[in-house]
Image: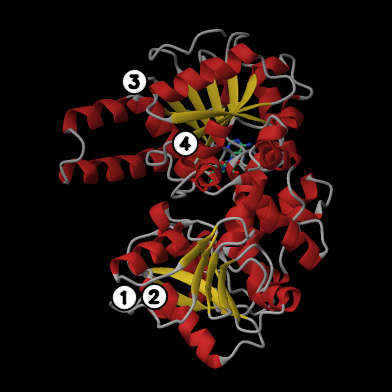
């Protein structure tokens, strides 16, 4: 197959569960005649009836036209057997996530369909290469990884295994675009793009919870402050800890136990205890009686006045330093600036507030001999965030209570709502964003996807506020590598090893 199938091309969808039904709807809306098959008696007809109810509700709300919905539903026919796939130009399978069951299905399909028919799998974790092995025409199998709910989520990862013919991947890429989706090419590797790059979003918060650096509500607030719609804890509660853990375990196992992906005992405990999240009524939060737990939100934000100081020196640059410089200038307050000191932040009469470089405040204090030392988190939201955006900070163990209070006031004076965490390496956002960038850099280096592909996938597949390479462009590679190297030295594991690609980038852009 060298060109995307015409809208008249019959599409056969196998598996009428949540994903298969959505795929059938999207294909039918794009004009294809669709047959929907499921081994469970009546499942395809039930799925069609459910689709009809959902689409008619959208008509009632004025979001879809009655005629368009009637035509869409008329194009979907429940199939009684696999034999009805004979005329299909494309088969998409969305059956149970088991290698042998999918392999058997694909082999059975090859006995029915014509040689020009493309076989697509919606697997979320199984190697497309492994699924193609043993097929008569393995080059026609491609991954077509939709996201849930299929009619809403724009992303489709178009996954090429070892055998996948480039023309087949191109045709499915073009077809996905014609279905109103944003396709992104990916090579078949564990977790593909989204499920791989997203691992640190959960893992870093789980690691912080493990060392009791903050509560779920605090850590969620920090990550929402970086622009994420949901914090990691509330998101894991929504996904379900069993599902989330099993994806992590699958990526970890498929990478031969690479410590980068090692699952968390904190999450294992929740699963063992049956606290699976929203669906079980309890996860990190309590959903008893269908309640939505209150989020930790900044109270009505009032910026604090600039703290008094004798000699004030701003070091380096970055959003916090620029905000302080502007506020001080507006208040007609004198200050000095030092560019090349190797850190970013402020020094007020010998007490310091620094942007984290991945070291805990206590380590910086010990290494510099500065007793009153505090660190603040990376402000990853665009422009550093609107007034009142939550930003984490921590004070070294030896810092005076008065400097801790003053450091928080400096952050508040710069427009942030300061949230104190324990003195954990890399705080919450810096380590999470650094690790997301790092994982994306590895994926690009390993040919899994392009930079633009990674950005699109993370924004459209999991609603990230920015793509990893957009964050990198706003931050800088040397700073990201510094955070990772400090985390690596602190934890002495393999989780924080910097991507060779990122290190190269840091050398190239070193100033
Ligand atoms: P589901 O459990 O809702 O539906 C699976 C359906 O396949 C069931 O109706 C089952 O009766 C049917 N089935 C099982 N074996 C079959 C066979 N041999 N032939 C025909 N039908 C068979 O599962 P869901 O969530 O729709 O997932 C389907 C696939 O999509 C899996 O591979 C999953 O990993 C993948 N996926 C799921 C996502 C999700 O959020 N649920 C997201 C992206 C991919």
Does label 4 or label 1 sit earlier along the sequence? 4
What residue is drawn where x is 26% and y is 25%? 71
Tell me, yes or no, whether the two marked residues, 1 and 2, touch with CB atoms within 8 Å: yes
Label 4 near ligand 1 (CB < 8 Å): no
Does label 1 or label 2 sit earlier along the sequence? 1
How crowded pointer 2 is (Cα within 10 Å; few <14, some 14-19, many 20+) is rated as many
* Mark carried by residue 362: none
Tell me, yes or no, whether the two marked residues, 2 and 3, touch with CB atoms within 8 Å: no
Q: Nearer the viewer, residue 151 or 297?
A: 297
Q: Secondary structure at mark 3?
A: loop
Tell me, yes or no, whether the two marked residues, 3 and 4, touch with CB atoms within 8 Å: no
Circle 3 residue: 31
Q: Quadrant of residue 362?
A: bottom right
How crowded pointer 3 is (Cα within 10 Å; few <14, some 14-19, many 20+) is rated as some
* Mark carried by residue 303: 1
* Mark carried by residue 155: 4
Q: CA distance from mark 2 to mark 3?
A: 55 Å
Q: Nearer the viewer, residue 483 or 30?
A: 483
Q: Is residue 278 visible?
A: no
Q: CA distance from mark 1 to mark 2?
A: 6 Å
Tell me, yes or no, whether the two marked residues, 1 and 3, touch with CB atoms within 8 Å: no
What residue is drawn where x is 77% and y is 52%? 497
């Amino acid at each position: 197959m060298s060109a995307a199938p015409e809208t008249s091309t019959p599409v056969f969808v196998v598996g009428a569960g949540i994903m298969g039904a959505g795929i059938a709807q999207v294909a039918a809306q794009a004009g294809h005649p669709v047959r929907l098959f499921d081994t469970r008696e009546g499942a395809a007809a039930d799925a069609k009836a459910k689709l009809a109810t959902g689409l008619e509700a959208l008509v009632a709300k004025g979001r879809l036209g009655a005629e368009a919905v009637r035509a869409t539903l008329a194009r979907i026919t429940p199939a009684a057997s696999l034999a009805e796939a004979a005329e299909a130009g494309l088969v998409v399978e969305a059956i149970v996530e088991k290698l042998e069951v999918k392999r058997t299905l694909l082999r059975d399909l090859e006995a029915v369909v014509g040689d020009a028919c493309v076989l697509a799998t919606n697997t979320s974790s199984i190697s497309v290469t492994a699924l193609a092995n043993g097929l008569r025409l393995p080059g026609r199998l491609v991954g077509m990884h939709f996201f849930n709910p299929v009619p809403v989520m724009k992303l489709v990862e178009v996954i090429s295994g070892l055998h996948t013919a480039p023309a087949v991947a191109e045709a499915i890429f073009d077809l996905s675009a014609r279905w109103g989706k944003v396709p992104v090419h990916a090579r078949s590797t564990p977790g593909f793009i989204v499920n791989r790059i997203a691992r640190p979003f959960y893992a870093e918060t789980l690691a912080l919870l493990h060392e009791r650096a903050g509560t779920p509500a605090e850590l969620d607030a920090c990550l929402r402050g970086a622009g994420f719609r949901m914090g990691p804890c509330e998101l894991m509660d929504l996904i379900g800890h069993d599902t989330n853990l099993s994806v992590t375990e699958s990526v970890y196992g498929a990478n031969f136990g690479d410590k980068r992906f090692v699952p968390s005992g904190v999450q294992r405990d929740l699963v063992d205890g049956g606290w699976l999240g929203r669906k079980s009524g309890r996860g990190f939060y309590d959903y008893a009686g269908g309640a939505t737990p209150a989020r930790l939100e900044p109270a009505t934000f009032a910026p604090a006045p600039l703290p008094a100081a004798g000699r004030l020196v701003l070091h380096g640059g970055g959003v916090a330093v620029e905000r302080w410089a502007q506020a001080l200038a507006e208040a007609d307050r004198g200050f000095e600036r030092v560019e090349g000191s190797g850190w970013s932040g402020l020094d007020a009469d010998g007490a310091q507030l620094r942007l984290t470089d991945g070291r805990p405040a206590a380590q910086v204090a010990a290494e510099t001999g500065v007793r009153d030392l505090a660190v603040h988190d990376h402000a990853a939201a665009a422009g550093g965030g609107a007034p009142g955006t939550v930003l984490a900070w921590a004070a070294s163990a030896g810092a005076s209570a008065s400097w801790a209070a003053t450091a928080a006031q400096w952050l508040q004076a710069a427009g942030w709502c300061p949230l104190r965490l324990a003195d954990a390496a890399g705080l919450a956002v810096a380590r999470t964003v650094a690790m997301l960038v790092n994982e994306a850099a590895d994926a690009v280096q390993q040919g899994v996807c392009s930079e633009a592909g990674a950005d699109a996938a993370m924004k459209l597949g999991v609603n990230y506020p920015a793509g990893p390479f957009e964050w990198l462009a706003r931050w800088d590679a040397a700073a990201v590598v510094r955070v990772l190297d400090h985390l690596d030295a602190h934890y002495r594991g393999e989780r924080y090893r910097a991507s060779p690609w990122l290190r190269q980038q840091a050398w190239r852009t070193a100033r």
